Amino acid sequence: MLESMQHILMSVLAPVLVIVAIGAVVQRWRRMNVKTLVQLNLYLFVPAFLYVRISQSTLSWTHIGGAALTVFGTIAVMALPIYYTLRTRRAAGNTIAAVVVGGLFFNAGNFGIPVAELAFGKPGGEVQALVVLFMNTSIFLLGYVALALAQGHGAKAALGYFKLPMIYAITAAFAVRETGYAPPAWVTTALQTIAGGMVPVALVTLGAQLVTRARWPRWKLIVPVMSLKLLIMPAVTAAIVWALGLWPWPGAQLILASAGPTAINTLLLTIELDGDAETAADCVFWTTLFCGITVTVVLSVLLALGGGPV
């Protein structure tokens, strides 16, 4: 098992973390425009990646529905216990919202996609593309509502989710998948080329985002978030996967995805709504830093138990 963990750390996690570190170093050195990098990911690379992976996916609708139930079910199971635990500790409303969102929503895109493809190849990317869809739905609707209510805002701006091009890229991808109609070869080639750039650009962006928010955290808040996000959430996801009969595939990828760090988008939403941005930034930074250990352990266990594409 120890040798397996070492192999996974070096072959799957190390390449990801090295590129993240490069992004952080370049950001310190040249001060890239992080907002532009985020927009490139959100409006170009991620939609192209989702289109290519989903349009070529061979997953059944049963597995697609199971993936949706797993993602939303895990959030539902964990949300109330986290909320009531913090309420009993008399935490401030905006801090509760930041911790709840930080503990529930994981980085499915610029961390999850590279790890999925390195761990399980193209099939991993196909499943992770769906996870990106479901997780972004959760973040921009459920997450926004939680943060908005904590700050006394309405949830009306959650409709901004429908302005994201990934929604329409995914719709087009499913249409191509189900009808068999494909755009001209030159369009497909262009989209595949853009999709191929998604992983390095996403990881560099992640590194640049993290280094701008790095600071010593409030451990009394961050340790519970890290425990919930990196340890308890994969266990809850595994139980749901088992109950829905999704093991070994796509269940293994769903469990691996849930072991990822807190999503960057939770920080962006918190800033937008004038919430507890410091706590949100701590959740993102420190879960990303420590997930190298926990993701390695989770993936080692999954492979040892026979998880993976069938």
Image (cartoon, helix red, strand yellow):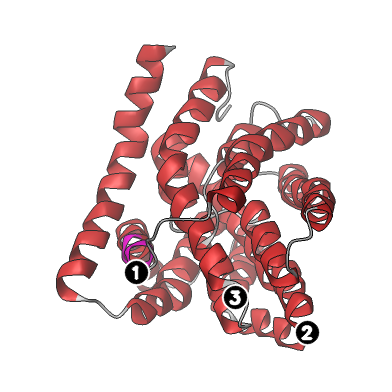
Q: Nearer the viewer, residue 77 or 84?
A: 84
| Residue 99 image point, x, y percent | 66, 58
Q: Position of residue 81 (x, y in %)?
A: 82, 47
- As measured in the structure, the alpha-carbon distance from the residue carrying label 2 to the one carrying label 3 is 14 Å
Residue identifier under label 1: 212
**Residue 210 drawn in magenta:** yes
Q: Mark 1 falls on what kind of element?
A: loop
> Image quadrant of residue 275?
bottom right
Quarter of the rendering containing residue 34: bottom left
The majority secondary structure of the magenta stretch comes to helix
Note whether 191 is above or below 285 in the view shown: below
User: Which residue corresponds to mark 2?
Assistant: 152
Query: Horizontal placement of 275 versus 90: left or right?
Result: left
> From mark 3 to mark 1, how far is it between C-alphas?
16 Å
For this view, does 63 lie left or right of residue 263? right
23 vs 268: above or below = above
Q: Earlier in the sequence, mark 2 or mark 3?
A: 2
Q: 10 Å neighbourhood of mark 3: few (<14), some, or many (≥20)?
A: many
Secondary structure type for disc 2: loop
| Left or right side of 113 for 249 | right
Q: Residues within 10 Å of mark 1 (few under 14, many from 20)?
A: some
Task: Classify 266 as above or below 113.
Answer: below
Specify the amino acid type for callout 2. Gly
Which quadrant, please, contains the C terminus?
top right
Task: Tell me which numbered mark, 1 or 2, is placed earlier along the sequence.
Answer: 2
Residue 101, label in figure: none
| Residue type for callout 3 | Leu
- Residue 205 in view of the camera: yes
Determine which residue is flagged by label 3: 269
Q: Is residue 236 magenta?
A: no
